[in-house]
Amino acid sequence: MKPTSKYETIRQMLSDLKLPEFRYLQILDAIFKRKIGEYERMTMLPKVLRDELIRTLGRHVSSVTPILEKSSKQVSKVLFAIAGGERVETVRLSYQRGWNSFCISSQCGCGFGCRFCATGAIGLKRNLNANEITDQLLYFHLNGQTLDSISFMGMGEALANPHIFDALTILTDPRIFGLGHRRITVSTIGIMPGIDRLTREFPQVNLTFSLHSPFDEQRSELMPINDRFPLHDVMKALDRHIRDTGRKVYIAYIMLRGINDSTEHAEAVAVLLRGRGSGEHLYHVNLIPYNSTDVTPESFGQSDRNRIKKFVWVLKSKGINVTVRTQFGSDIDAACGQLYRTR
């Protein structure tokens, strides 16, 4: 069976060379405790093993190469080069209480064409493999950043890429990244087979569903995926997720001025989320201010503050849990829906 990550490749190599298990632990210790990013510098290993690692995997531990970084208050965005001449973007958010949150990409581009999203304007170039997904975080780790929380909300639709599950295995392996499942969030536009698989294999990982309209016809117009996985079918999958895991499901809702921010929309969101059984209190709506870019239609604009306040009031009056998300990084095109692998 072909290894799915560099870590499995290393294990296989050590087995083929008939080397003891402690060599694998030494390599992991070098990467994750000593923060050594080049195999040649792992001088605790025999030279013959270092040479074999370089021959098989290349000189650098990471498979992604940083080529541009933009920063603003509390946010930095890194553009990585990946194999095949493609590029992806990753965002780090630093909160004042000292918490680092990372928004990572799962695909180069995206093939689902949500009309308000810059990444969708690229189209899908390819899925990232497990190394390319996790190495975005490895870059920050090797540079001394603490990986407090991770969200798959960068470029691409995470649950359309089967490698995401290999990446989650790596991220939660206590000998590798060692991240707690509840510190990871996977966001989806409603890929039902992926939702069901996440429920089975990673029930403690947080799940966010991008709704953006409670009306089927309008949602299909904004998000063509709705024709393939209709809203009410997706909601049943989310109900199963809540029933089987006992965990919250977050509902992401980008506020588009004059399009989906009316009182009627708010009431319809409440109708959608009420009466879903014993787990209905585990749905939580996150309202997200819209962020425009040079490649998204000019017809989309940000809802005004009073519209958002009224939307919140309607939801709360119907017993719906709701938060208005604070947005960072829009000035460097690092906020929700703005990633476009610039340059």
Image: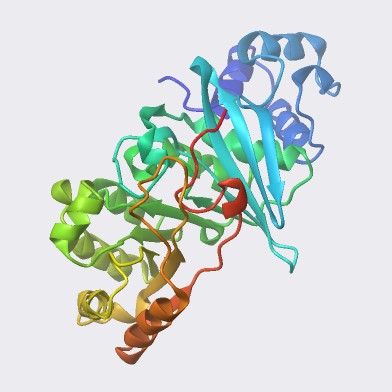
| Residue in the image at 42% along x and 42% along y | 118
Q: In this view, does 115 lie above or below 47?
A: below
Q: In this view, does 86 lie to the left or right of 300?
A: right
- Indicate whether 25 appears above or below 319: above
Quarter of the image containing the C terminus?
A: top right
Looking at the image, is 186 positioned above or below residue 144? below
> In this orientation, which residue lies closer to the viewer: 223 or 251?
223
Check the image and name the residue furthest to the bottom: 317
- Looking at the picture, tell me which residue is in the foreground, 119 or 64: 119
What is the x, y in percent for residue 334? 57, 48
Q: Measuring from the top left, give residue 331's x and y in whole percent.
A: 61, 52
Residue 281: image quadrant is bottom left
Tell me if I can see residue 233 in this picture.
no
Image side of residue 112 versus residue 23, left or right: left
Q: In the displayed image of the protein, which residue is found farthest to the right?
A: 43
Asked whether residue 161 is in view, the answer is: yes
How many marks do you count on the picture? 0
Q: Which of 246 and 339 is in front in this view?
A: 339
Residue 279 location in percent, x, y? 30, 78
Q: Give the residue displayed 43% in from the left and 82% down from the top.
A: 309
Please report the residue visible at 46 percent of the width from the left and 30 percent of the height from the top: 128
Colour setting: rainbow
The answer to whether 12 appears left or right of 3 in the picture is: right
Quadrant where the N terminus is found in the figure: top left
Q: Which residue is drawn at 52% across and 61% down?
A: 182
Q: Quadrant of residue 213?
A: bottom left
